[in-house]
Image: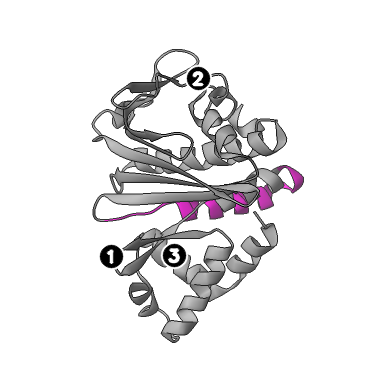
Amino acid sequence: MNDDKVFKALADPSRRKLLDLLFQHNGQTLSDLQIHLDMTRFGCMKHLQVLEEAGLLTTQKVGREKHHYLNPVPIQLVYDRWVSKYAQPWAQALTGLKYALERQPMEQKHTHVFEIFIRTTPEQLWQALTDGSITPQYYFGSSVQSTWQPGATYTYPQPNGGTFVEGEVLEIDPPRRLVTTFRALWREDALDMPTSKVTWQIEPVHDVCKLTMTHDDLVPNHPVTENIITGWSHIISGLKTLLETGQPLMTNA
């Protein structure tokens, strides 16, 4: 991730407005977004390209349309890198920005997409996602348990008892694709949440891997949903740091 690109992208008021529009309603098309800006369709498209190049949004083709989704991972990485180097007011400003991007009130179940490039191999990334001896270093101390077969269950136990998450393996294609159900269990108000779906997609790009994690069927305006999105930001940034440096993030310790 290029920090300069992130700061440059956030410096423009039109691009900040686009991010505001997306956290109000994620998954919008170019036409949906352009009507809110005093500029041409081409101008809006150029701003979206800058945000995408900075990693602040991802896109998915749905039929003939391209839908845009916020990606809070770069904000988390900037936070992780710089928070310890500046005085508390700066840290508070970065934290406020991060959580503003992660809050996404919506009127229906929605999808959240996380995307990041990691300097590793598909095999090493797959092992980090599925090996219970590795996951504690980035997944809040939890050692994942599963046979990783289609139809098998998986659990992320809490270090001090209880369970963070459980679910079922729907699809598995090592080291490229893993699809599971997701049931949050770490807090009482999560127990009435319906089961959602998580898809991990690994794509080699030259000497790095593009990791895309898609969380479908999230409930809008629910505190657990915001908790999930915040948690994924920590987990994915911690995974990147672990694979690229060999050391876990202190925030995931």
Q: State the SS at label 3.
A: helix
Q: Amino acid at mark 1?
A: Gly
Figure quadrant of the C terminus: top right
Q: State the SS at label 1.
A: loop
Q: State the SS at label 2.
A: loop
Q: Amino acid at mark 2?
A: Ser
Residue 165: % across, % down: 38, 26
Majority SS type along the magenta span: helix
Q: Residues within 10 Å of mark 1 (few under 14, many from 20)?
A: few
The residue lying toward the viewer, choosing from 137 and 171, is 171
Q: How is the image coloured?
A: one colour
The residues bearing labels 2 and 1 have C-alpha atoms spaced at a distance of: 39 Å
Q: Quadrant of residue 12?
A: bottom right
Residue drawn 47% across the image and 40% down it:
232
Q: Which residue is mark 1?
A: 63
Residue 12 magenta: no
Residue 145: % across, % down: 43, 18
Question: In front of the other: label 3 or label 1?
Answer: 1
The residue lying toward the viewer, choosing from 155 and 249, is 155
The residue positioned farthest toward the top in the image shown: 161
Q: Which residue is mark 3?
A: 20
Q: Magenta residues, as a range?
A: 84-106
Q: Which residue is mark 2?
A: 143
Q: N-terminal of the two: label 2 or label 1?
A: 1
Q: Amino acid at mark 3?
A: Asp
Q: Residues within 10 Å of mark 3 (few under 14, many from 20)?
A: some
